[in-house]
Image: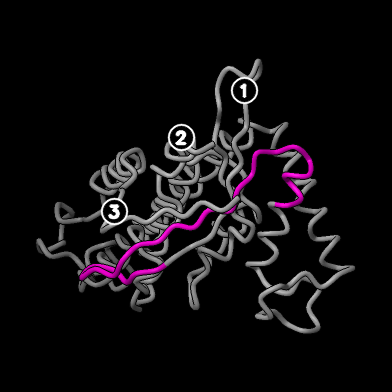
Amino acid sequence: MTITRKMENYVEENQNMGEENKIISSLYNNIFILTNDDEEGGGGGGGYNDENPSTYIFGCEDDNNNDTQVTMENAIYWESQEALLKEILEQYRLIGSKVRKGITRSVEGAKDVGINNVICECFNGKVDGPISCAKCFRRRVVEELCEKGFNASLCTSKWNHTSKMPGGRHEYIQVIASTEGKKKKVPLLIELEFRDEFKLAKSCKEYSKLITLLPQVFIGKSEHLNAIVGLMCDAAKRSTSQQRIHLAPWRKRNFMQMKWPPLAAAAALKVA
């Protein structure tokens, strides 16, 4: 089953992550750099003490003061982002762990099929590759899931080019799971190459560390996915800013969230 969703100029910002980033910003405003304006002999501006060459007043050189403040802000930012990501991932792992294990087995089963048989139907894959292409692999995973009794479908999100971001399309897998007693349907989104979605051509070590914390295959609710996307996109922006390089538009939050629109999960319940 394939579901195609087309959105016209739709941009969804995750409000929860916005609040979390406000908390981080408030931490920055409470950073105090030690100065020594009141010290005797400081001369108001501080710096080097001519009367005692062995004495240097910390934090009074403007350049050093700014560098120290930026370093402290960056350290607090990355520490906060890592803590937030770990908290999100902890909640992600606790919810739906049983069905996630079943889906993971199906994904591994699809990989085994690819190792023994070339499964590419579009001839876009590598001739010598165990799994010919990502598109055909996703289709095989959906087939494997359906064979195991899951309500799985291959979904495609599409969006048009605007003045703020380029257009594009993205394929992902969706499984409609049921809660205990089958009283409620819960849509789960599956991204088979989740870490790759956030990789940058050049990134700082702190950002690279965040990527290693992410699951290689994401299987979870849209709420957790949007929280991760918001956090990682903000981190990508900080990483490129620190290195004074441009952040590609396809790594910005509004573009990334179009790949897995928050409304897709609710819309899927109507067609399931």
Which residue is under mark 2? Answer: 270
Magenta segment, which residues? 143-168
The reply to whether the magenta stretch includes residue 155 is: yes
Is 216 placed above or below 161 here?
Answer: above
Q: Secondary structure at mark 3?
A: loop
Q: Give whichever of 199, 184 is nearer the camera.
A: 184
Residue visible at 25% across and 66% down in the picture: 66
Q: Looking at this rendering, what residue extends furthest in the right direction?
A: 116
Q: How many discs appear?
A: 3
Residue visible at 31% across and 49% down in the picture: 12
Residue 127 in which image quadrant: bottom right
Residue 53 point in image, percent of width and height: 29, 73
Amino acid on which the number 1 mark rests in the picture: Thr
- Left or right: 51 with respect to 199? left
Which residue is under mark 3? Answer: 11
Query: Neighbour class for label 3 at 10 Å: few (<14), some, many (≥20)?
Result: some
Q: Secondary structure at mark 2?
A: helix
Amino acid on which the number 2 mark rests in the picture: Lys
Coloration of the structure image: one colour
Residue 225 point in image, percent of width and height: 49, 46
Q: Earlier in the sequence, mark 1 or mark 3?
A: 3
